[in-house]
Image: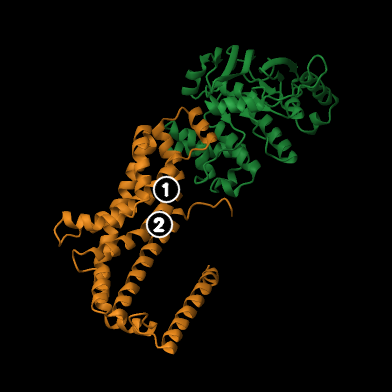
Chain colours: A green, B orange
């Protein structure tokens, strides 16, 4: 269950967050979305962020991606500043909505980042086909996104996020809109893909079983302001003998249910009281005001 | 495909023919005078006897409409791209053009006629170009400005430049809006080209034929030229729709 197990570890951690704080301010009021976040994600590690709505987990993901600047603290991605990492395209981002371009073929959608990066046509075609093959959609290369189901669109988005072989994959509830069956299949595929590419993953989710299934570590956040309440080590995918397991092997194992209970209790907080009373609205108002 | 065409075309055709038949019946049964309302048969006769002259007139009017439409559309796309890229240009230009949209642009025709020689087609083409400019500009700008939050974040995560966003997302995304504007502009351009001819200047188009036929109390002749104008307007509209279909045929509608 050690976090350092798994892919051959380069010395460089994928993400280092030091004393991150984020305050949204606008229209004369400010909302503290994140405070005092310290977190290190090792190379190849799978870390989930979980917490009640409005705990700032999506905000934290965007701070790592340099899509939002932190108010305080420092972000290092692969040893570089968040901005350098974004400009150097060091990470892939998969959003809650697939966000595909409807007028492009599935293939051209996966090619988008490579095209923007100036890779030549033949090369990026080859790479995109390889990626579509990895997510099991090679037969759909010539289709357009509206012809695909939600799950397939999300797989295209994941292929697109992996296009530049990032060492870090940032995912913001990518399976949130999928039905339970599709969701479990996507989780299995994500686990396989993450292992194949040995990318570190920071995964935002609402789902306790999803976090328990996927993660080496689950970062449990509390809200108002968002802070790390507890970090639960899970790592159900590695067996003691070093082989890995997936699917029903995990989902029906007693350790899986134990992990779920552990995360659930961490979410409830130390005093055993459920954390309710969301200040979501305030945060979204402040965000909009910006 | 053919069957769908028949199904969608049959009802308007049947209705149209019925209206014309009723019109004919009404005029002959009630002995309506031709200066009040000529019978469709009389209009048709006038159209057939005059068809070569109506055709020539339609060519002149059609050319004015076409030149104005093309110039207005090109300008509209350019200015809209500029406004979408530069906030200050948007702030300066867009409210004025919105105001222009509320103005009856053909009202400019007599003024422009006075500025140029009476044999110039230029004032007409200017009026057409302004008429076509407005809907294309408004629609293209709206299309170019639309950038969903997820696409904005996606492109930011790629560190893509504003020009790259314009090329890969905004322009393709604005294409349906462009064609909506073009369809409106195509109809407007023929209306503007015909109506500007009512205010003097060259006497070579459909609008001039209509005014001169009316002043000579040749009402079936005037209606025949109106019919020519209707056909010209339809032609422009259909060409715009066909262009749209061809350009968009590779896209898939999300509703399918």
- Chain for numbered disc 2: B
Please give the count of numbered marks on the rendered protein: 2
Residue A255 image-quadrant placement: top right
Residue neighbourhood size for the residue with mark 2, other residues' Cα within 10 Å, grouped as few (<14), some (14–19), many (≥20): some
Q: Tell me whether circle 2 and circle 1 mark residues in contact (CB < 8 Å).
A: yes
Can you say whether A103 is above or below A272 in the image? below
Can you say whether B39 is above or below B129 in the image? below
- Where residue B41 sits: x, y (%)? 37, 85
Q: Secondary structure at mark 1?
A: helix
Whichever of labels 2 and 1 marks the residue nearer the N terminus, that label is: 1
**Quadrant placement of the C terminus of chain B:** bottom right
Residue neighbourhood size for the residue with mark 1, other residues' Cα within 10 Å, grouped as few (<14), some (14–19), many (≥20): many
- Where residue B117 sits: x, y (%)? 13, 58
In the image, which disc is placed on residue A57?
Answer: none
Q: Quick check: A265 left or right of A73?
A: right
Can you say whether B237 is above or below A125 in the image? below
Nearer-the-camera pick, B162 or A124: B162
- Where residue A131 sits: x, y (%)? 57, 36
Residue at 39% from the left image edge and 62% from the top image edge: B237
- Where residue A261 sits: x, y (%)? 82, 23
Between the residue at mark 2 and the residue at mark 1, the CA separation in whole angstroms equals 10 Å
Residue designated by label 1: B139
Nearer-the-camera pick, B29 or A240: B29
Residue designated by label 2: B184
- Chain for numbered disc 1: B
């Amino acid at each position: 269950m050690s976090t350092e197990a798994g892919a051959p570890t380069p010395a460089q951690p994928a993400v280092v967050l030091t004393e991150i704080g984020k305050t949204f301010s606008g229209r004369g009021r400010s909302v503290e979305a994140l405070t005092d976040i310290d977190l290190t994600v090792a190379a190849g590690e799978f870390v989930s962020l979980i917490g009640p709505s409005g705990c700032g987990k999506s905000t934290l993901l965007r701070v790592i991606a340099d899509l939002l600047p932190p108010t305080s603290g420092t972000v290092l991605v692969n040893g570089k500043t968040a901005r350098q990492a974004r400009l150097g395209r060091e990470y892939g981002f998969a959003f809650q909505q697939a966000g595909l371009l409807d007028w492009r073929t599935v293939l051209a959608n996966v090619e988008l980042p490579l095209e923007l990066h100036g890779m030549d046509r033949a090369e990026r075609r080859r790479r995109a086909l390889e990626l579509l093959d990895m997510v099991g959609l090679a037969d759909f290369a010539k289709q357009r996104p509206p012809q695909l189901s939600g799950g397939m669109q999300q797989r295209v988005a994941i292929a697109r996020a992996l296009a530049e072989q990032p060492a870090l994959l940032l995912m913001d509830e990518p399976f949130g809109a999928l039905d339970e069956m599709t969701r479990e299949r996507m989780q299995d595929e994500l686990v396989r893909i993450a292992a194949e590419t040995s990318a570190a993953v920071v995964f935002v989710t609402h789902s306790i079983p999803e976090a328990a299934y996927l993660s080496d570590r689950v970062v449990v956040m509390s809200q108002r302001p968002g802070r790390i309440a507890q970090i639960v080590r899970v790592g159900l995918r590695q067996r003691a003998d070093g082989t890995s397991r997936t699917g029903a092997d995990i989902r029906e194992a007693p350790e899986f249910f134990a992990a779920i209970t552990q995360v659930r209790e961490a979410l409830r907080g130390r005093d055993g009281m459920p954390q309710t009373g969301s200040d979501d609205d305030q945060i979204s108002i402040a965000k909009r005001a910006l | 495909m053919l069957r769908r065409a028949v199904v969608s075309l049959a009802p308007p055709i049947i209705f149209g023919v019925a209206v014309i038949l009723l019109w004919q019946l009404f005029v002959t049964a009630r002995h309506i005078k031709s200066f009040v309302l000529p019978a469709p048969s009389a209009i048709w006769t006038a159209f057939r006897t005059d068809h070569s002259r109506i055709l020539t007139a339609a060519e002149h009017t059609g050319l004015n409409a076409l030149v104005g439409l093309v110039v207005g559309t090109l300008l509209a796309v350019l200015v809209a791209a500029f406004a979408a890229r530069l906030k200050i240009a948007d702030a300066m230009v867009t409210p004025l053009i919105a105001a222009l949209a509320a103005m009856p642009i053909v009202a400019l025709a007599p003024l422009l006629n006075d500025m140029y020689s009476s044999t110039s087609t230029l004032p007409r083409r200017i009026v057409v170009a302004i008429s076509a400019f407005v809907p294309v500009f408004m629609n293209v700008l709206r299309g170019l400005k639309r950038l969903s939050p997820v696409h904005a974040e996606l492109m930011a995560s790629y560190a893509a430049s504003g020009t790259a966003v314009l090329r890969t997302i905004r322009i393709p995304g604005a294409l349906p809006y462009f064609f909506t504007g073009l369809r409106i502009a195509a109809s407007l351009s023929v209306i503007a080209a015909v109506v500007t001819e009512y205010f003097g200047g060259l006497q070579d188009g459909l609008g001039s034929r209509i005014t001169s036929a009316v002043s000579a109390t040749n009402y079936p002749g005037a209606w025949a030229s109106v019919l020519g104008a209707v056909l010209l307007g339809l032609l422009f509209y259909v060409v715009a729709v066909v262009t749209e279909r061809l350009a968009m045929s590779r896209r898939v509608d999300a509703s399918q």
